[in-house]
Image (tube, grey):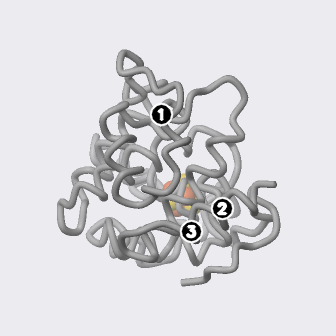
Amino acid sequence: MSAQAYGWLMAGGGGDLFDRHLFACAATVAMADQGWPLAVGLGLSAEALAALVGEFFPHAPGLLVGLDPDVDGTDPMTADEAALRALLLENRTAGAVEEGWLARIVARRALSPRQLWQDLGLTSRADLSLLLARHFAPLAARNRHDMRWKPFFWREIEAASGMDCRAATKCRRCTHFSHCFGPETGTSLIGTPPAYAP
Ligand code: SF4
């Protein structure tokens, strides 16, 4: 079902193809959230969601059914979400409006304990790495040792506030090494891998 929804969003949409893929994956997985309106599942305001749908999925106005302009999906649910959103916004590649949407979406979806690429409904870690390299290039470039993305984000946030874990030990000697480094494998939350692969 999810893969069908993804295929439908991709088939009739507009905008940049890779960005359409990113937003189609996130919308597909967010639509499956129990009890959350789509704007909340994506961390977007009603206005931003309407603009996103108008640009990338003009054939799917059903995504906006029930959209309540008084429900502000941008209210952060946790301090971690607010911090990650700020980190991403500070590190946008071009400052494009789509990158602002992605910053909010990534920060909201990252609240789960899964791999970040799974949270976003993507097909693999490679998809996520490409998202970050394209749209948050200064931040992606700092992950020189290919850390897992969530631990890398938290380390960046903590280091910015003067609590760099690497000041106390080398990563290779750290008891958290296997948490911070290693493959980020799993299955896509939207089922059969989508036909589009960047
Ligand atoms: S392995 Fe240890 S020192 Fe290295 S980033 Fe992770 S927590 Fe910090």
Callout 3, which amino acid?
Answer: Met
Identity of the residue drawn at 21% across and 61% down: 96
Total label count?
A: 3
Left or right? Give the position of 196 relative to 40.
Answer: right
Locate the N terminus and report the quarter of the image it occupies.
bottom right
Residue 26 image point, x, y percent: 56, 53
Identity of the residue drawn at 55% across and 59% down: 24
Q: Is mark 3 within 8 Å of ligand 1?
A: no
CA distance for labels 3 and 1: 19 Å
Q: Are marks 2 and 3 in contact (CB under 8 Å)?
A: yes
* Mark 3 secondary-structure assignment: helix
Q: Are marks 2 and 1 in contact (CB under 8 Å)?
A: no
* Mark 3, residue position: 10
Q: Residues within 10 Å of mark 3 (few under 14, many from 20)?
A: many
Identity of the residue drawn at 41% across and 19% down: 71
Callout 2, which amino acid?
Answer: Tyr
Callout 1, which amino acid?
Answer: Ala
Res. 175 visible in picture: no
Mark linked to residue 156: none
* Mark 1, residue position: 39
